[in-house]
Image (cartoon, rainbow, N blue to C red):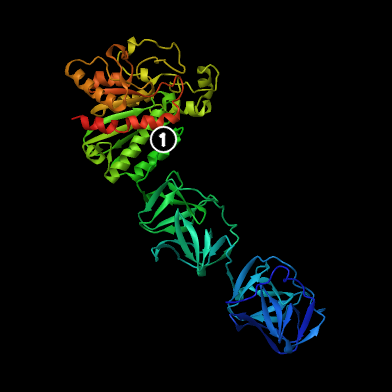
Amino acid sequence: MFSILLTADDVQASEKYVTVTAERLSIYENQNGQLVEMGHLLKGMEYGVIAESGNWLEIQYGDRRAYILKAATTSSDGKSIIKKSGNKKEVGAIEVTEDTTIYDNATGALIPFGVMKKGVSYPVINDLGNWLEVHVAGRIGYIHSSTTKKIFSPADRYFKVVRDNVPIYENRNGTLIEVGRVVKGMDYERVKDIGNWHQIDFGGRTAFVLKQATEPSAGKAVTWQGNVAGKYSLQAKEDATIYDNSTGKLVPFATVKKGISLNVTNMSGNWIETIVGNRKGYIYIGSVTFLPTDVVNPKTVYTYTQMQRDLTILEKMYGDFLEVHTIGQSVDGRHLYAVKLGKGKKEIFINGSHHAREYISTNLVMEKIDQYAYSYARGTKIGAYHTRTVLDDTAIWFVPMVNPDGVSLVQLGHKSAKRPQDVLKMNGGSTNFASWKANVRGVDLNKQYPANWNNLCCNARYPGPENYKGTKALSEPEAKALYDFTLKHNFRAAISYHSSGEILYWYFKQQGSQLQRDEKLARKISNTTGYSMVPKSASGTGGGYSDWFISTQKMPAFTPELSPYAGRQPVPLKNFDRIWKQNVTIGLMVASEMK
């Protein structure tokens, strides 16, 4: 199509006017050298003229130049035109769905002065509901909105769906595949205008909605989300509804088809959050499964809340071979989570964060769960170990955070505790809890186990940041939960991760064949990690989880200190890559060694 578009300076009151003398004066547009009728003007009415061109007069017709026959007009002064077309900004565009009368309303009465032909597209300068204001040949006119439909310009950001059950398509190698649906009456933001299609973000996918089923929208009906990257992905187990909750009420605004995957941006209880058309949407957790991917970010200050979220995702993602259990509660009521990974009848046990400031051990344990599960799902190896083979023979149980109250104190401060004034007092009034090891009652959980507990040395006299063993063994619910959990199982080995020193505790009064077996495995762990084996003469005097496990379960237990010595503070996160490289295979190695 060829047309001459008007500039801003053209769209203004003309200095030349004519009066139409024919009963019906056609308006033409020059489309590729051919005159195409776009409408007509009425006899006796005055109009503004832009220029003369031979036998033709050029007039302004919306955002273009159109033509009328000069012989069907006579020159006039334009005084009858009360409202002339000034330089008004366009607010949208329409297509005329039937031949439509254009009215003047300057006097308060509707006076016809022209007709737009069916199929003509036209810019609108004001939307008054039932009436649309337009520029026509130097004057302001009005057309009834019932005879039009809104159309899009490339600059339009939002659209409203105007039909039922409108599909969302994905373009797969030139073939349109339906991946979901949008809902009539709902607004969406588009990424770009592509011919007859809107391109939208559909949960991280590039998808398309047919323009013909939509109209332009101001986008005021929803709170727009902005660009949010998805951390992991879900797959719909059935055609699943996506709800808007911006008003506090669940309102359906899209569906995703069975088998289609979308990115997940967050979780809230039983609801999965994703983004569709730049709107935050929620899908019920029971209607989806999670696709295997990295979940845990171990290079961050890893909180109890983040651990809860990640465990929920991991269980949904790997439910065939990963289980999450609650084995007790902390003093402040936080759950103590145990994770079973694998299907084997034999079992080993790994735990972290007995000590609050040593929460890097939770980062390590959670990353093990994440990477071992991912490897199992994909059927790959980690180091020399085929993960699925190991975990089909031996299940690994993990308790990632034995001391969630203490970890929260170190990371979030005294206000994370139910009794903040009590922990402040135990901390000497300081709000800096970086050196805190104990639980929220000021008891060192790794001095709580009944292994030579009565004879422990080097104890603090009162509850506080570190080294207070409590009033009796297992006085603290966290230690008692781990104790009871262990007795319900027949673990072949245990690893209790601590954080600082790159050494390996392994000995607590073993003798004979038990000593030989445990020392052999300790040497293998030492050779893999590079951690020095602590001499028997310098080993612990009791009270620790590994001490108790060795003495009562008669099976090997190890306490690796993960990082180069960091002092009385959390291990720097920059050390995690080194820690991971040293320990990535340890769980699989110990599991494969225990016959």
Q: Nearer the viewer, residue 500 or 244?
A: 500
| Side (left or right) of 125 relative to 240 | right
Q: Is residue 436 left or right of residue 397?
A: right
Q: Secondary structure at mark 1?
A: loop
Q: Position of residue 376 (x, y in %)?
A: 28, 42
Q: In which quadrant will I find the N terminus?
A: bottom right
Count the numbered circles shown: 1
- Most extreme residue toward the left, as rendered? 513
Residue 175 x, y percent position in the rendering: 39, 66
Instruction: Identify the image quadrant of residue 546.
Output: top left
* Amino acid at the residue labelled 1: Pro
Q: Nearer the viewer, residue 154 or 79?
A: 154
Which residue in the protein does label 1 denote? 298
Quadrant for residue 373, please give it: top left
Q: Residue at x 51, y 18 (%)?
A: 427
In this picture, is 74 found above or below 320? below
User: In the displayed structure, does residue 48 sit left or right of residue 197?
Assistant: right
Viewer-side residue, 446 vs 47: 47
Whole-percent x and y of residue 393? 21, 37
**The C terminus lies in which quarter of the figure?**
top left
Res 98 → quadrant: bottom right
Q: Of residues 78 and 11, which is closer to you in this image?
A: 11
Q: What x and y, as percent, mark residue 493?
A: 25, 26
Q: Is residue 287 visible?
A: no
Position of residue 197 relative to residue 489, above or below, is below
Task: Identify which residue is drawn at 35% across, 48% down.
Answer: 291
Answer few, some or many: residues within 10 Å of disc 1's Cα (few below 14, many 20 plus, some between 14 and 19).
many
